[in-house]
Image (spheres, grey):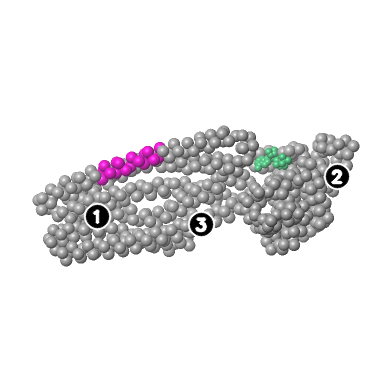
C-alpha cells in the first residue's frame, strides 16, 4: 500500500500540514476540560465573575481556533485525497491502456472497472482519514490518560483499567469484522460482474426472454452481498451499546469515587467534571482508532488489487532498440511458418501459416467459424505476439517496428465495430485528428455511407449515443470503415466488417476501396465467398491450419475447405 503513496507526492505539503492542524485542534480539545474545571472551581464556586468570564472567553477562543484548524485540515485532506485518487486513476488507466489483448482478456473488464473506481475510492478515503485522524485519535486517547494523572493520580487508575478493557473488546469485534469486510469486497466484485453483463447484454436477455432468470441471478448476488453486510453490521452494532455500557460504567465509577473525594475535600467538583470529559474523549478516540483499522484493512485489500494491475507487465511492448521506419517494399507482408496460441497453456490456434502479399494487393481470408481468421489478422498490428516462425512487414521483422509506427500504418476494423459517444465527426477524427470536412466526406463516400450521413439533420454533427446504439449494425460498420479509411493506412484490415451489409452495398464498397485506395493493401476477412472471390489472393483456414492460398478459380480445384464453402453459397453454374 505504501508504494502507492508515491502518487500522493505532489500533495506532501497538505499531507504534512493537515495532521499538524488536526493535532493543534486536539491539543485545544484536551485543554478545554482543564479550563472548564477552573471556570467551575475558581470562578462559579468562588463567585469570582472575572475568572468565570476569563475562562469562558479562553474556552471560546480555543474552540474557535480549533474550528479553524479543523477546517484547514479538512481542506488539505480533501485536496490531497482527491488529487491522489485522480493521479492513481490516471496512472491506472495509462497502465491498462498499455495492456495487450492478453492481459485485458485475463482480467476481464468488470474487475478492471471495480479496481479503477471502488478500490481507488477506498485508497482515497484511507488517505483522507490518515490526514484527519491518524495523529488525533491516538493523541487524544493517550493525552486523556495523561491529563487524568495530572488532575488526580489517585483516580486516574480508572482510566488505566478502562483502556485495556475497551481495547480488548474492540479487538474481538475487529477480529470478526475485518475478514468479513474482505468478503464483502469480493462479493461486490461478483455483483459488478453480473450487473455489467446484464446491462451490456440487455438486448440479448430480452430477445431470449431471460429477464426473470437474469433478475433472479442478480437478486441472488445482491442477497449474498446483503447477508454479508448484515453480518458485519450486526457485529458492529454491538459496538455502540457495549461502548455506552463501558463508558457509563466508568463514569459512574468516577462520579462515585470523585464524589467521595469532593466530600472529604480531596478533589474539586470541576476536576470531577474534567475527568468525566477525559473519559468520554478517550473512549470516543478509541472507537475512531477501531474505525481507522477497518478503513485501513479495506484499503490494504484494495491496494493489493491496484498493485496487481501496476505489477502486470504487458506482454506486447516496444523493445529497446526498435528503430525501423515504415518504408514501403514490394513485399508488404510475409508469414513464414507462423504459429500462435492465445495463452501459454492453450494449444496452437494457428499452425504453420505461410503466405506473402505484395503492396496494393487484396487478400481475402475465409474459413469456417473458429478456424482462426480473427486470430491471424490480430497478429499484423501486433495485438498479440506470434509464438513460432517469423512475420515480416516490408521485409522487416514485425518486432523491429515500434507499436506506434505499426499501428499508424495499419488500420483494423474489428468484427464488432464500436462507435464512441460524441458525433459522427468526432468518431471520424479518431482516424485523423485534423481531418478536414472534405476528407471526412471522401471517407464516408468510399464507405458507402455519405448519402446516409447527408440525410441526417445535423450531418457530420449528428449525435452518436453510447456504443453507437442509435445506428443500425450496417451503418455502424460503414462509419467504422470510414474512420479507418481517413487514416489513409498502408494496410487496411476488415475483420468480417462487411457482414451486416447487403450484397450490393458490400460490392460497391469493395469496388470503391479498390478504385480509390490503389496503394493500400486490403485484407478482407469474411464468411461470404462473394466478399473474397475477386481478391488477388485468398487464404483458406481450417482449424487453425492453412488449407490453400491462391485465387478463387484455383482454390476451387485445390482446397477442399474452399470448395465446400463455395458449394454451400454459390449456385453450381456460377462456380
Ligand atoms: N481470447 C481468446 N482466448 C483463447 N481462445 C480464443 C480467444 N479468442 C478466440 N479463441 C479461440 O481461438 C479459435 C480461433 O478463433 P477466431 O476468433 O480467430 O476464429 P474465427 O475464424 O475468426 O471465427 P469467426 O468466423 O467465428 O469469427 C477459436 O477456437 C476460439 O475459441
As drawn, is 204 to the left or to the right of 491? left
Q: Which residue shows up at 25% across the image and 50% down it?
A: 279
In percent of width and height, residue 549 lies at: 82, 43
Q: Tell me where the magenta segment starts and ends, as one range.
A: 231-247
Residue assigned mark 1:
146
Which of discs 1 and 2 lies nearer the camera? The answer is 2
Residue assigned mark 2:
551
Mark 1 or 2, nearer chain start: 1
Distance of label 1 from label 2 (alpha carbons): 92 Å
Magenta region, main secondary structure: helix
In percent of width and height, residue 143 lies at: 27, 55
Residue assigned mark 3:
86
Disc 1 and disc 2 in contact, CB within 8 angstroms: no
* Residue 306, above or below 235: below
> Residue 484 has which mark?
none
Disc 3 and disc 2 in contact, CB within 8 angstroms: no
In the foreground, 226 or 128:
226
Ligand 1 is located in which of the four quadrants? Answer: top right
Q: Quadrant of the C terminus?
A: top right
Amino acid at each position: 500500500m505504501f508504494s502507492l503513496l508515491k502518487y500522493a507526492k505532489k500533495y506532501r505539503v497538505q499531507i504534512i500540514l493537515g495532521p499538524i492542524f488536526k493535532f493543534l485542534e486536539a491539543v485545544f480539545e484536551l485543554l478545554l476540560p482543564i479550563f472548564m474545571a477552573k471556570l467551575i472551581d475558581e470562578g462559579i464556586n468562588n463567585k469570582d465573575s472575572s475568572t468565570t468570564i476569563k475562562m469562558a472567553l479562553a474556552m471560546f477562543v480555543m474552540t474557535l481556533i480549533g474550528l479553524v484548524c479543523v477546517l484547514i485540515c479538512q481542506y488539505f485532506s480533501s485536496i490531497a485525497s482527491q488529487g491522489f485518487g485522480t493521479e492513481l486513476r490516471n496512472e491506472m488507466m495509462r497502465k491498462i491502456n498499455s495492456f495487450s489483448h492478453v492481459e485485458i482478456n485475463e482480467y476481464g473488464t468488470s474487475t478492471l472497472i471495480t479496481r479503477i473506481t471502488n478500490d481507488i475510492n477506498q485508497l482515497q478515503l484511507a488517505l483522507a482519514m490518515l490526514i484527519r485522524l491518524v495523529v488525533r485519535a491516538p493523541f487524544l486517547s493517550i493525552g486523556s490518560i495523561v491529563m487524568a494523572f495530572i488532575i488526580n493520580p489517585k483516580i486516574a487508575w480508572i482510566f488505566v483499567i478502562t483502556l485495556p478493557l475497551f481495547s480488548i473488546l474492540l479487538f474481538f469485534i475487529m477480529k470478526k469484522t475485518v475478514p468479513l469486510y474482505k468478503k464483502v469486497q469480493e462479493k461486490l466484485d461478483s455483483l459488478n460482474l453480473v450487473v455489467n453483463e446484464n446491462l451490456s447484454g440487455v438486448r440479448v436477455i430480452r430477445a431470449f426472454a431471460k429477464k426473470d432468470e437474469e433478475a433472479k441471478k442478480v437478486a441472488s448476488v445482491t442477497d449474498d452481498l446483503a447477508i454479508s453486510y448484515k453480518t458485519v453490521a450486526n457485529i458492529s452494532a454491538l459496538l455502540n451499546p457495549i461502548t455506552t455500557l463501558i463508558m457509563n460504567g466508568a463514569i459512574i465509577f468516577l462520579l462515585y469515587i470523585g464524589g467521595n473525594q469532593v466530600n472529604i475535600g480531596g478533589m474539586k467538583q470541576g476536576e470531577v467534571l474534567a475527568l468525566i470529559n477525559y473519559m468520554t474523549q478517550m473512549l470516543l478516540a478509541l472507537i475512531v482508532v477501531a474505525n481507522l483499522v477497518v478503513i485501513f484493512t479495506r484499503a490494504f485489500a484494495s491496494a493489493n488489487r491496484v498493485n496487481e494491475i501496476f505489477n502486470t507487465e504487458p506482454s506486447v511492448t516496444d523493445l529497446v532498440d526498435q528503430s525501423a521506419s515504415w518504408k514501403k517494399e514490394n513485399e508488404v507482408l510475409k508469414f513464414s511458418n507462423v504459429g500462435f496460441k492465445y495463452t501459454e497453456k492453450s494449444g496452437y490456434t494457428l499452425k504453420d501459416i505461410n503466405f506473402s502479399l505484395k503492396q496494393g494487393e487484396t487478400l481475402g481470408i475465409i474459413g469456417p467459424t473458429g478456424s482462426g481468421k480473427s486470430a491471424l489478422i490480430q497478429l499484423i498490428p501486433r495485438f498479440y505476439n506470434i509464438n513460432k516462425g517469423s512475420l515480416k512487414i516490408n521485409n522487416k521483422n514485425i518486432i523491429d517496428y515500434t507499436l506506434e509506427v505499426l499501428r499508424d500504418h495499419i488500420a483494423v476494423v474489428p468484427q464488432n465495430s464500436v462507435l464512441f459517444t460524441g458525433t459522427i465527426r468526432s468518431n471520424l477524427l479518431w482516424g485523423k485528428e485534423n481531418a478536414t470536412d472534405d476528407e471526412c466526406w471522401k471517407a464516408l463516400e468510399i464507405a458507402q455511407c455519405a448519402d446516409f450521413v447527408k440525410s441526417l439533420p445535423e450531418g457530420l454533427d449528428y449525435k452518436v449515443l453510447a456504443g453507437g446504439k442509435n445506428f443500425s449494425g450496417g451503418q455502424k460498420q460503414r462509419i467504422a470503415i470510414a474512420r479507418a479509411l481517413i487514416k489513409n493506412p498502408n494496410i487496411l484490415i476488415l475483420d468480417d466488417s462487411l457482414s451486416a451489409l447487403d450484397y450490393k452495398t458490400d460490392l460497391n464498397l469493395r469496388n470503391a476501396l479498390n478504385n480509390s485506395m490503389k496503394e493500400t493493401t486490403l485484407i478482407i476477412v469474411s464468411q461470404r465467398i462473394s466478399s473474397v472471390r475477386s481478391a488477388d489472393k485468398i487464404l483458406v483456414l481450417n482449424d487453425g491450419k492453412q488449407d490453400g492460398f491462391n485465387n478463387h478459380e484455383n482454390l476451387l480445384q485445390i482446397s477442399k475447405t474452399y470448395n465446400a464453402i463455395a458449394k454451400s453459397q454459390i449456385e453450381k453454374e456460377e462456380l
